[in-house]
Image (spheres, grey):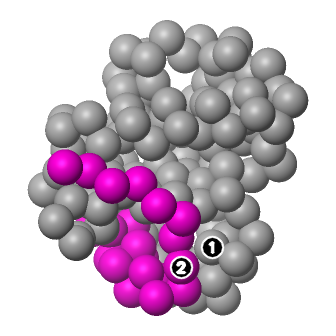
Amino acid sequence: MIQIRQATLEDLPEITTIFRDTIRAVNSKDYSEKQIEVWSSDADNLEEWKDRIENLYFLVAEFKGQIAGFAYLKNGFHLDGLYVHKDFQRRTIGSKLLRIMESRATANGYEVLKSDISITAFPFFDSHYYEVEKRHKKNYKGLAFENIIVYRDL
């Protein structure tokens, strides 16, 4: 049984491990080794993660006491991150987190949920009826990443 709850600072080690491992295991099929190295190194920016947990709507999904995924919402309607542990892919965890984030955006008074996603995540969002607003190259730490801005009317 999956339990969804607000993230706490005590979750930080598991959250950053999931972030790093998911990028290395799942996104590596769509991005270069250098891109994966740079992107996954963001797990080491603990101050930024603490800030997200303390100041954003940040949820974790637990399965038998282990964090299996997390998601966080910025500015009330922007899904800034959704990651599912590499060993829990395709088990509805991402879908549950996404539905809750959509509900929260609606509760915040917004009629749309947006996200800037990786190309790896596109099939997931496409299956949840998200539309492409724009495909673009995102410059991050000197590297160009192919990303997609998606949205869904709520």
User: Nearest the camera: 7 or 35?
Assistant: 7
Q: Please, is residue 146 above or below residue 12 in the view?
A: above
The numbered disc on residue 53 is 1
> Of marks 1 and 2, which one's residue comes earlier in the chain?
2
Image point 36% across, 27% down: which residue? Answer: 124
Say which quarter of the image contains residue 109: top right
Helix, strand or loop at label 2? It is loop
| Residue 40 point in image, percent of width and height | 42, 70
Q: Tell me the crowding category of disc 2: few under 14, some 14 to 19, or many 20 or more residues within 10 angstroms, Cα based.
A: few
User: Nearest the camera: 68 or 39?
Assistant: 68
Relative side of 131 to 67, left or right: right
Image point 35% across, 22% down: which residue? Answer: 123
Say which quarter of the image contains residue 70: bottom left
Q: Please, is residue 53 above or below residue 50 in the view?
A: above
Q: Please, is residue 32 above or below residue 112 in the view?
A: below
Image point 74% across, 52% down: which residue? Answer: 74
User: Nearest the camera: 9 or 124?
Assistant: 9
Q: Is residue 129 magenta?
A: no
Point out the stretch of residues depicted in magenta.
Answer: 1-22
Relative side of 89 to 5, left or right: left
| Residue 72 point in image, percent of width and height | 60, 55
The numbered disc on residue 8 is 2
Question: Callout 2, which amino acid?
Answer: Thr
User: Nearest the camera: 119 or 31?
Assistant: 119
Q: Determine contact: label 1, label 2, CB under 8 Å.
A: yes
Say which quarter of the image contains residue 91: top left
Helix, strand or loop at label 1? It is helix
Question: Callout 1, which amino acid?
Answer: Ile
Can residue 114 be seen by looking at this rendering? no
